[in-house]
Amino acid sequence: MENELSIEILDALACPACNAELKYKKENSRLICSKCKKEFRIENGIPNMLVKE
């Protein structure tokens, strides 16, 4: 499975830490928060959005 997200899924997601918009970086399969800059990996097409404390 590829590590890509559909636009529909991306539009529905927000940063779990600060609720800001996420930007998709296809070249490294990451979602990056536009506000707090946290990065979330995409594994097998599924965003891993757990916030580590």
Image (cartoon, rainbow, N blue to C red):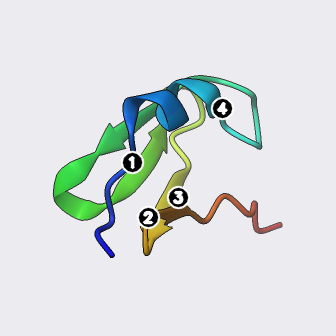
**Spatial CA span between label 3 and label 2:** 12 Å
Mark 3, other Cα within 10 Å: few <14 / some 14–19 / many ≥20:
some
**Quick one: label 3 or label 2, which is nearer the N terminus?**
3
**Quarter of image, res 28:** bottom left
Residue 14: assigned label: 4
Residue highlighted by disc 2: 45
Q: Is residue 50 above or below residue 24?
A: below
Whether tag 3 and tag 4 are in contact, CB under 8 A, the answer is no
The kind of secondary structure element at disc 2 is loop
Label 1, label 2: how far apart the Cα atoms are? 6 Å
The residues tagged by marks 3 and 4 sit, at their Cα atoms, a distance apart of 11 Å
Residue 30 at x, y percent in the picture: 38, 56
Q: Name which quarter of the figure residue 36 lies in.
A: top right
Residue shown at 53% from the left, 58% from the top: 40
Q: Which residue is mark 1?
A: 5
Instruction: Name the mark on residue 29.
Output: none
Q: Are marks 1 and 2 in contact (CB under 8 Å)?
A: yes
Horizontal arrangement in the rendering, residue 17 relative to residue 35 (left or right): right
> What residue did someone put label 3 on?
40
Q: In the rendering, at what x and y percent does residue 31 appear?
A: 44, 47
Nearest to N terminus: mark 1 or mark 4: 1
Q: Amino acid at mark 1?
A: Leu
Judge left or right: residue 44 versus residue 48. Answer: left
What residue sits 64% from the left and 23% below the top?
Answer: 20
Earlier sequence position, callout 4 versus callout 2: 4
Residue 42: x %, y % from top left = 45, 64
Judge depth for marks 1 and 3 and give the one in front.
Answer: 1
Circle 4: residue type: Ala
Q: CA distance from mark 4 to mark 2?
A: 16 Å
